[in-house]
Image (cartoon, coloured by chain):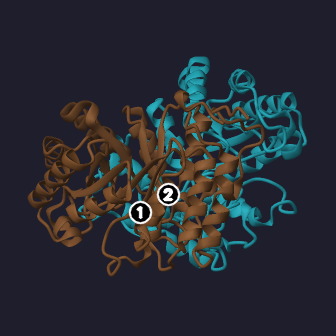
Chain colours: A cyan, B brown
Amino acid sequence: MINTAAVDVLISEVGPRDGLQSIKSIMPTFAKNAWVDALYQAGVREIEVASFVPAKLLPQMADAAEVVRHAKTLAGLTVMALVPNLKGAEAAIAAGVHKVTIPVSASAAHSLANVRKTREEMIQEVAKIVQFRNEYAPSVKIEAGIATAFGCTIQGLVSEDEVIWMAEQVVSAGADESGLSDTTGYANPAQIKRLFRRLKAAIGSKAGAAHLHNTRGLGLANCLAAYEEGVTSFDSSMGGLGGCPYAPGASGNVVTEDLVFMFEAMGVKTGINLDLLFEARKPLQAGIPNEMLYGMVPEAGVPKGFELTSKWEV
Amino acid sequence: MINTAAVDVLISEVGPRDGLQSIKSIMPTFAKNAWVDALYQAGVREIEVASFVPAKLLPQMADAAEVVRHAKTLAGLTVMALVPNLKGAEAAIAAGVHKVTIPVSASAAHSLANVRKTREEMIQEVAKIVQFRNEYAPSVKIEAGIATAFGCTIQGLVSEDEVIWMAEQVVSAGADESGLSDTTGYANPAQIKRLFRRLKAAIGSKAGAAHLHNTRGLGLANCLAAYEEGVTSFDSSMGGLGGCPYAPGASGNVVTEDLVFMFEAMGVKTGINLDLLFEARKPLQAGIPNEMLYGMVPEAGVPKGFELTSKWEV
């Protein structure tokens, strides 16, 4: 087992949600559970296991409650789910999640396209979810991630003032934390530093995770920039599943395996064992045999003489 | 045309040498020349156009002198070539290069495997090349890049003290500059910062380029780290050609297109026009139709609303 008290950064695995909802294959429930188990065995301690949305819209997520219930059997694991609205939050909380994450777009155009609500309506939705949580499940944490924080494929540029304003609004509405998401893979390291610095200045310790994509190859450089700016919580996806894959074999989300390698090689403790993390690709691939898993370090292997910074005690 | 006086970083294109010597195809001379022209049109102002080695060893480089002579017709372009020894340097200088680069391994094992010389013998070779240059071509610049500076696939770890010692030795032997090469794709951002800081402390303004690979996906993150440490000269390869390709579709060398995009998006002027750079992939692909070109930004396109930092005046 690993000494999680000594972890420097939290790697939050979003593959079971962000990854699986973006592919054609539907991963069977037992396979999802086996994958979550393997991630946990590798030392992953926060997993976004599902999205609570109508099964009609996302049949890949029809078993959300079942996956939550299984993940909750793993001691010390923070079980997260994405919820787009109050109805989803009610279902997720009923299933027993520890934390919900609500996507709130900084882009007015993306907000309408993604959740058919204006940004102001989404802030009200966050307030409603907070009210429900306060009344029925006060221990559940609420994250409201600012989507399209670094640019939008529909409207292009997104005002940095509006991004920070959105984060302030969701925190005022009662969210426990608000992170920034590069939904479109538009971000660059200078922008990452500027916006996370402003986010911390605006909402202090409620500044949350960096959810970054690798669409233009800058995923790890952007994670590095965020880390240098003091961010300690990172979303990523095993095999790079999810996001908006343009490049063949490439991916949207930052690849968990590559991200963990970067941090561990730098001497930054993730608490994750890289060999066991590579092992966790097997149940994932077994559950979605027709999908291609991405990842540079799994292909190339670790450098000769490489040692993990996170020490494991057996 | 572009105002090159305002450039913040120098992107040195190594594809015609590092890229073309690593693939099976032999690119015809006229196609190499057309590619070099297109790179130049895009604003690239330093190109490593060839390697002066026996054609028996590297038939891809048999036309080295011809390519140098063509490249020299492009005003303001620094024409570089790799030379492994004095004989190569004599040929390169006879062909008219502005600058030679000599690979000197920090790994004792790699030095023997790569050039069949010990590290000490290679330092003597640098001294011989310097002597020849001083006598016959005093305007030619000499770079001695420290290969395997971040680790070696044969011996594993490479002592950082020995890397810095090697750089000091080649500079003492008369090299004008010494950069660091991640020949094996082993580097991480923390190591990059540490070693380039030490390099600058050891050899001051003679600290040269960062030659980084993307074998484990950290290429751009490592370039960012080097830039933050004050490095302003970067080797990269169009289409990511070259290096040690493990991952299918992926590559060894950092992709020029992605690197230029990162810097320009950050507000760091490269002097390169990204649209014209993408155009330069066409003559490259035409000359090696059976090889796959890599690059995330060429596939995904630039973000909506993106503007180059380097302003072009027509």
Q: Secondary structure at mark 1?
A: strand
Q: Quadrant of residue A25?
A: bottom right
Give above or below for B49 relative to B314: below
- Residue visible at 46% across and 59% down in the picture: B69
Give above or below for A139 relative to B253: above
Residue at mark 1: chain: B
Let me know if residue B83 appears in the view. yes
Q: Quadrant of residue B312?
A: top right
Let me know if residue A6 appears in the view. no
- Residue visible at 58% across and 53% down in the picture: B39
Q: Which residue is mark 1?
A: B50
Query: In the depicted view, which residue is nearer to us: A82 or B161?
Result: B161
Among the two numbered marks 1 and 2 on one chain, the one whose residue lies closer to the N terminus: 1
Query: In the depicted view, which residue is nearer to us: B1 or B171?
Result: B1
- Disc marking residue B237: 2
Mark 1 crowdedness (10 Å alpha carbons): few <14, some 14-19, many ≥20: many
Residue at mark 2: chain: B
Task: Name the spot of residue A112 as percent of width and height, x first.
Answer: 89, 40
Amino acid tagged 2:
Ser
Query: In the depicted view, which residue is nearer to us: B231 or A86?
Result: B231
Task: Tell me, yes or no, whether the two marked residues, 1 and 2, touch with CB atoms within 8 Å.
Answer: no
Q: Are marks 1 and 2 on the same chain?
A: yes
Amino acid tagged 1:
Ala
Q: Secondary structure at mark 2?
A: loop
Q: Is residue A174 left or right of residue B118?
A: right
State the CA–CA distance, disc 1 to disc 2. Answer: 13 Å
Mark 2 crowdedness (10 Å alpha carbons): few <14, some 14-19, many ≥20: many
Task: Name the spot of residue A128 as percent of width and height, x first.
Answer: 80, 32
- Residue visible at 57% across and 28% down in the picture: A196
